[in-house]
Image: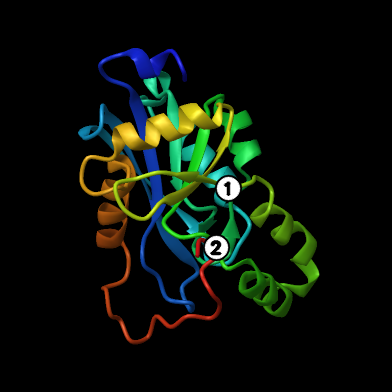
Amino acid sequence: MRSSLGKPFVRTVGVDDGAFRRSDRRAPLVGVVCSGPSQVEGVLRSSVEVDGTDSTARIASMLIASPHLDGVRAILVDGVAFGGFNLLDLVELAALTHRPVVSVTRRRPEYPKIRRAIAKYFPKEFDRRWALIRARPLFRVPTGGEPIWAAAVGCRRVDAVALVRRLSVHGFWPEPLRLAHLIARAYGRPVGDARRGARAPDPRG
């Protein structure tokens, strides 16, 4: 990825999930392929099981099936939680796609609160789920305001920081992730749906 940062345009894909209710079986998943910060080249769609264990496989298969993956230099994801507590394995995703993966979150996660939630709602799977939450150390990404936080697999921290800052053209959030979020919300439940509810704190903080 380091050599790609020196080029005028770098193709990346941002992946995020959409709104859902806890009673839903699946949550929408969207990937947006961009060249440079914001030139959209493709939109990918899939889904993940709410609070399930298939996020790594589903994201990987969505990307591998896309004709756009060939030119993609890095994958950006919004945190490691999709569809509630369906936790992404960053190392496995990087291995399956043969691409660096950068996970970005707006706030540093509240680990004690997340740990209690996993222990309460997933006691039989606590060790595996907690290990995925803490698998990669977070590092700060400086911005013009409050810092954001990231974890990276398959690239150096300095390159991950450079990539995130290069792709942030509207505020301090990478454009592929901003677009993926907007599109995924359109596929999901209406904002403010009173039936959606929340069972546990978001692992992304």
Q: Position of residue 182 (x, y in %)?
A: 25, 55
Q: Amino acid at mark 1?
A: Leu
Callout 2 secondary element: loop
Q: What amino acid is found at the position of numbered circle 2 in the picture?
A: Pro
Choose top left, top right, bottom left or bottom right for residue 43. top left
Q: Earlier in the sequence, mark 2 or mark 1?
A: 2
**Residue visible at 58% across and 65% down?**
85
Q: Is residue 65 visible?
A: no
Q: Residue at x 31, y 71 (%)?
A: 189
Left or right placement of residue 95 versus residue 65 in this view: right
Residue 138 numbered mark, or none: 1
Q: Secondary structure at mark 1?
A: loop
Task: Say which mark, if any, is on residue 109.
Answer: 2
Q: Position of residue 161 (x, y in %)?
A: 44, 35
Quick one: label 2, few (<14), some, or many (20+) residues within 10 Å? some
Q: Are marks 2 and 1 in contact (CB under 8 Å)?
A: yes
The answer to whether residue 9 of the structure is visible from this angle is yes
